[in-house]
Image (cartoon, rainbow, N blue to C red):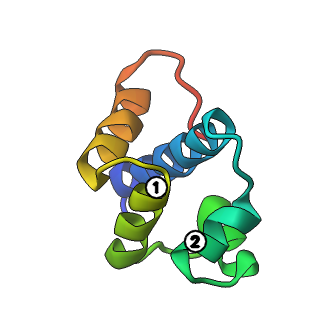
Amino acid sequence: MDNAFEGLEAALSTQIKVELAENGMDQKTLAERVGIHPVTMTKYLKNQRNMPVNVLFEIAGALGLSPRVLMERAEARIARPGAQTA
């Protein structure tokens, strides 16, 4: 994969973790709501496995967001100087 895609994946993982914290939810609960194994969720959020688009949509919904908003927030992390993405 190219660096831009990897950067977006890292920013998306970070943003999902931020949303989890803001919603008082843990990864296990998110995995249950999405219908995937908690280990799989961990691999997605550690960028050890590519996240399918349908899972991204399910995660956004479980967090009470549209996929577009979730992606925009992740992209904003890349655009901000000094933004952390991991």
Image location of residue 8, percent across then percent down: 40, 49
Q: Secondary structure at mark 2?
A: helix
Quickly name the residue at label 1: 9
Q: Secondary structure at mark 1?
A: helix
For image coordinates 47% across by 49% down, the residue present is 12
For image coordinates 29% across by 50% down, the residue present is 66
Horizontally, residue 15 falls left or right of residue 68, namely right
As measured in the structure, the alpha-carbon distance from the residue carrying label 1 to the one carrying label 2 is: 21 Å
Quadrant containing the C terminus in the rendered view: top right
Disc 1 residue type (three-letter): Glu
Residue 1's disc number:
none
Q: Residues within 10 Å of mark 1 (few under 14, many from 20)?
A: many
Disc 1 versus disc 2: nearer the observer: 2
Disc 2 residue type (three-letter): Arg
Horizontally, residue 68 falls left or right of residue 77, namely left
Comparing 16 with 11, the one in front is 16
Image location of residue 4, percent across then percent down: 34, 49
Looking at the image, is 46 positioned above or below residue 72? below
Residue 28 appears in which quarter of the rendering?
bottom right
Residue 20 appears in which quarter of the rendering?
top right
Q: Residues within 10 Å of mark 2 (few under 14, many from 20)?
A: some
Q: Residue furthest left?
A: 68
Image location of residue 19, percent across then percent down: 56, 40
Quickly name the residue at label 2: 33
